Amino acid sequence: MFATEREARAYTDPGTGALIWQMLVAGLVGVGFYFRRITSWFKGRKGPKV
Amino acid sequence: MSHPATQGQSISASFRDPAGSLFRYRGRILRVVNAIGAADLEAFLAAPSGQKLMNSGSVASTRRLDDVECRELLADPAVRELYEARHGQMILEHERIDFPSYPYEWNPEMLYAAGMLTLDLAEALHADGLGLKDGTPYNVLFRGPEPVFIDVLSFERREAGDATWLPYAQFVRTFLLPLLANQVYGLGLDQILTTRRDGLEPEEVYRWSKLSQRLRPPFFGLVSMPTWLGGKHKQDDQSIYQKKLMSDPEKARFILDHVISGLRRTLQRLKPKAGKSSVWSDYMTTNNNYTTDHFSAKEKFVAEALREFPARTVLDVGCNTGHFSAIAASSGAKVVALDYDPVVLGDVWRNARERKLEILPLAVNVTRPSPGTGWRNEECASFLDRASGNFDAVLMLAVIHHMLVTERVPLTDIIDLAAELTTNLLVIEYVAPDDTMFRRLTRGRDELHKELTPQVFEKECARHFETVRMQFVEGTTRRLYLLRKRA
């Protein structure tokens, strides 16, 4: 229900190429997110020992 | 956006947003909101970020009308008709911005400021699980030199796993690509935006770009990749438009923040630079026809005129660096400053913002003012529709020779227009045909203006105005007149 309502509201033209480009960049940023999570996990493990 | 309504006539209202319609009613700015918009709007009004943004003035102040006020409005059949046609659930009243202006009248600095405000709002709202559903400069007006976000129906509740900023492409089309085209190709915003409501398509800019530009930022991300990817995409494949939710909301938020900060970096890269020069940018320092003493006399004349006849609103036609606009604003007036040179207007805007002066600079040539645009020429009113009779005082200093010579507008028509624009005062400078600046413009066509004399000028003015006083400036070729409109 929420998704249907949302689509009705979004009247802005989302473009085509620009939307795909945003998704591709999002994919790369998503990899960066996990990388950041892993590095902060290691930092967190090291933290208490210091 | 809409037209004034009188009792019994149907009301012209905005129509694109499925969540509601904006309309003007007896000088009030009202909005019918239906079920689609009501829930999002209430979420915005209840959110801490919503209250903060309205209190700071970044978002136009808005209040929901109570039942009694709604009943009074709905007693007018025209309002009732609109309310029922749009399935209204509530009526909002917005703060009235003194002089509405449109992106094709702005200088690039103003488009930049409007873009920054849009991204600031998007970011502030994400913290409360809200967001913007569109990213267009038509959501922004200017209160003096300050941008104000006016479309409260642009706010929506976001789902936590949604990492896509749907207005991304619109923001690129309407803010970033026009600024890029202005910076790289020298195109004016009027040339780009008067006929393009939704901005520039990446494909259009791609055709203008050189091969060497296409692989470099900001062309690569704004123009080339969207063009190449869009070209490869099968047009009947609708799958990319389906909403995709991530299972990890933290990841979605991380990506969304990255999208907004990436747009912010690109916008900053396209920030118009101060200190540019144009034909008119050094007019006040080197290129004008005044000695210091005479210029001071002119300053004094204008300041005294506005002291004697205080004006709430002033229109400065041909403002150049905005020197006299600043004098008017310092007298307490709200000023609209016109010039057709967007470079000098950039300085006017920066100066007004720094000094907190109520000056709205607009890149409008009064001899070819902005037309009514949009559907039926009615969505955005023409400049003259907005300006006529809306100013207590009009300044026309060192400008009539441009209108007479360069644009070939007859003197009678210039004075007629001044009388339409002002409700009371006109401060006008007479420039004689033998003045050196006048002759620079005639370029040997002196014959065309040989009939122009102070007597002819005074006779034309006397049709609408009475003279309060006249003063010679710079020898005998220029005179300043303080005129009051006849009752």
Image (cartoon, coloured by chain):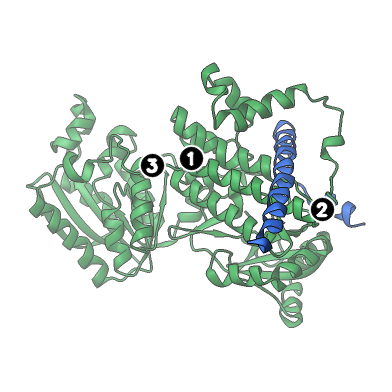
Could you tell me residue B48's position as x and y percent? Answer: 66, 72
Please name the residue that numbered disc 1 is placed on. B269
Nearer the observer, B272 or B429 = B272
Marks 1 and 3 sit apart, C-alpha to C-alpha, by 10 Å
Residue A21's tag is none
Could you tell me residue B428's position as x and y percent? Answer: 25, 53
Q: Nearer the viewer, mark 1 or mark 3?
A: 1
Q: Is residue B114 above or below residue B174?
A: below
Please name the residue that numbered disc 2 is placed on. B248
Spot the blue chain and give its letter.
Answer: A
Label 3 crowd bin: few (<14), some (14–19), many (20+), radius 10 Å: few
* Circle 3 chain: B
Nearer the observer, B284 or B86 = B284
Amino acid type of disc 3? Lys
Marks 2 and 1 sit apart, C-alpha to C-alpha, by 32 Å
Q: What is the quadrant of the N terminus of chain B in the image?
A: bottom right
Tell me what hue chain B is rendered in.
Answer: green
Nearer the observer, A12 or B407 = A12
